[in-house]
Image (spheres, helix red, strand yellow):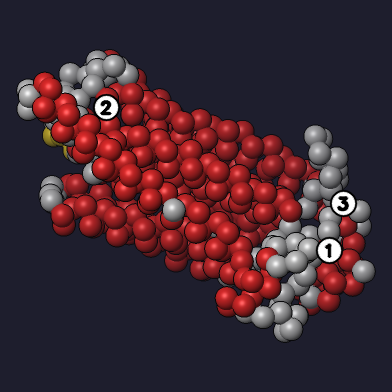
Amino acid sequence: MADTTMTHTSQMETRPAGWRGIAADWASDQRAFKNVSWGKAMMWIFLLSDTFIFGCFLLSYMTARMSTRVPWPNPSEVFALRIGGSEIPLILIAIMTFVLISSSGTMAMAVNFGYRHDRRKTAILMLLTAALGATFVGMQAFEWTKLITEGVRPWGNPWGAAQFGSCFFMITGFHGTHVTIGVIFLIIVARKVWRGDFDIGRPGYFTSRRGRYENVEIMGLYWHFVDLVWVFIFAFFYLW
Amino acid sequence: MAEATANGLGQHALHATHAHDAAAVATTDTHQEHPIKLYLVVWAWLFILSTCSYLVDYFGIHGYLRWSLILIFMMLKAGLIVAVFMHMAWERLAMMYAIILPPILVLVFVTMMVFEADYTLLTRIAFFGPGP
């Protein structure tokens, strides 16, 4: 038997709620996440560990920025773009933020249509999400190119504290890698949706487990997490 | 037994009838069906909040007002994404606490590194003198 039985909490009024519910759900030899499948629970736990990775990156950035005697380069000026003869601060980063938020919106709707078993709409929305993600990575590549030509290196830059470059390349590079991996997986899952794998419960190539529309939601969890990390990077690295 | 538990939920009965292997598919399919409008509203709010945090920089607000505004907009956006887009608001408390509490403990690490960074800065100033 592949999956352990799930307790459907909505029909079990006997299960206590609140603090008592936490203790009762975690206690004794039983599954802790009553109505969450193993796939979804494992994705959440992976995302939790990824949170710590990004947390450590942002922490090391904070420590570097707080402990340097040299003034930190002003991100508002560093990431400004000259459009129509005037410098607009942070404009590229703002557009990237809107692109990523839009991709999160289309992903949420793809999950919704997935549960309604609307193959066409789910696949199209997922491909749209992937396209927006690829646009984001493209804009990030443009930003990297611009900064590198202006002389930013991991060991120094023309404007101030030397640690700026290493923090920038490490944090945005790792995030961009996450987006790229997400785009690849979005295309793979979209193909499966399009082919109808989740309607017939076709076994996966690697796992040999039956696919279901919940896979779209698990994919969505990863994608929303990428957006979530960007919210923190945007606030702490670009705006602070 | 597994089938009985799964089909007991009304919303599962519908697709269990046309799924090829009803037991295997329905057992672990936890439904999250909400109106599309909800996602569009949240999407709109994320746009508004992002615009607000961008305007903080555009208008050049500085000092504590800047930092608190950035943090407020950041937390609101993160909350909306986790609660609605990632469906955390509809999970049981045991799940919410298992995922949301551990990252909050990172704040302990932050406090430690704030002290460490202050100390490093102090020794750098004592050794090299104030910044260039």
Give the crowd class for mark 2: few <14, some 14-19, many >=20 residues within 10 Å. Answer: many
Which residue is identified by label 3?
Answer: A2
- Tags 2 and 1 both on a single chain: yes
Which label is found at residue B37? none
The three-letter code of the residue at mark 1 reads Thr
Q: Chain of mark 3?
A: A
Residue B30 seen in this snapshot: no
Q: Is residue A20 above or below residue A54?
A: below
Residue A32 seen in this snapshot: yes
Q: Chain of mark 2?
A: A
Which residue is identified by label 2?
Answer: A164
- Position in image of residue A215 (x %, y %): 71, 50
* Comes first in the chain, label 3 or label 2: 3
Which label is found at residue A5? 1
- Tags 3 and 1 both on a single chain: yes
The three-letter code of the residue at mark 3 reads Ala
Say whether residue B58 is left or right of residue A46.
Answer: left
Q: Is residue A41 above or below residue B121?
A: below
- Position in image of residue A181 (x %, y %): 58, 33
Quadrant in which the N terminus of chain B appears: bottom right
Q: How many marks?
A: 3
- Position in image of residue B111 (x %, y %): 32, 48
- Tags 3 and 2 both on a single chain: yes
Quarter of the rendering containing residue A64: top left
Q: Callout 2: helix, strand or loop?
A: helix
* Comes first in the chain, label 2 or label 1: 1
Quadrant in which the C terminus of chain B appears: top left
Q: Chain of mark 1?
A: A
Say whether residue A59 is left or right of residue B26.
Answer: left
Q: Callout 3: helix, strand or loop?
A: loop
CA gap, disc 3 and disc 2: 49 Å
Q: Residue at x 12, y 49 (%)?
A: B62
